[in-house]
Amino acid sequence: PPTPVVITSVSYSVEGVLLQWSAPQHCQFPVQWSPCLPPAWADFSQTAVSTDGTFSFLDDGYESGGFGPARFYRLRQVNLQ
């Protein structure tokens, strides 16, 4: 079975929350978020893609109505092969 893809870096700045991870470049990743656990996952409108296997996604808070005290993320992997 394929190795699960995990978010390897989370950084915070005035622009928002930047998620980064590595995966085969033939993949796409719809990114989801939830303000609480257990999660009620919501999709961001953009899908993360990469030409070199290094993926990143910036959550600027716009689509989610701003940032609250907690934010959880997950990736859904879509293989294009």
Image (tube, helix red, strand yellow):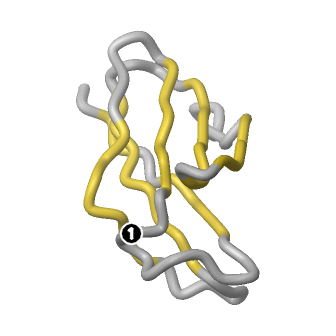
Residue 48 vs residue 16, the one in the foreground: 16
Task: Report the number of discs.
Answer: 1
Give x and y (percent) for residue 17: 61, 52
Residue in the image at 50% along x and 34% along y: 56
Q: Nearer the viewer, residue 77 or 59?
A: 59
Q: Residue 73: x and y, percent?
A: 60, 63
Image coordinates of residue 80 in percent, x first then y, are: 24, 31
> Which of the image's four quarters has the C terminus?
top left
Query: Horizontal and vertical percent for residue 4?
Result: 64, 40
Residue 20 located left or right of residue 47: right
Residue most extreme to the top: 52
Label 1 CA crowd tier, 10 Å (few <14, some 14–19, many 20+): few
Left or right: where does residue 45 sit relative to residue 73? left
The amino acid beneath tag 1 is: Tyr
Position of 60 relative to 53 (above/below): below
Q: Is residue 20 above or below residue 65?
A: above
Q: Residue furthest front?
A: 14
Q: Does 8 sit left or right of 5 as displayed?
A: right
Who's the residue at 42% across and 10% down the image?
52
Q: Quadrant of the N terminus?
A: top right
Q: Is residue 62 above or below residue 5?
A: below
Residue corresponding to mark 1: 62
- Residue 36 falls in image quadrant: bottom right
Q: Secondary structure at mark 1?
A: loop
Q: Nearer the viewer, residue 78 or 59?
A: 59
Residue nearest the observer in this picture, 19 or 21: 19
Q: Residue at x 53, y 87 (%)?
A: 40
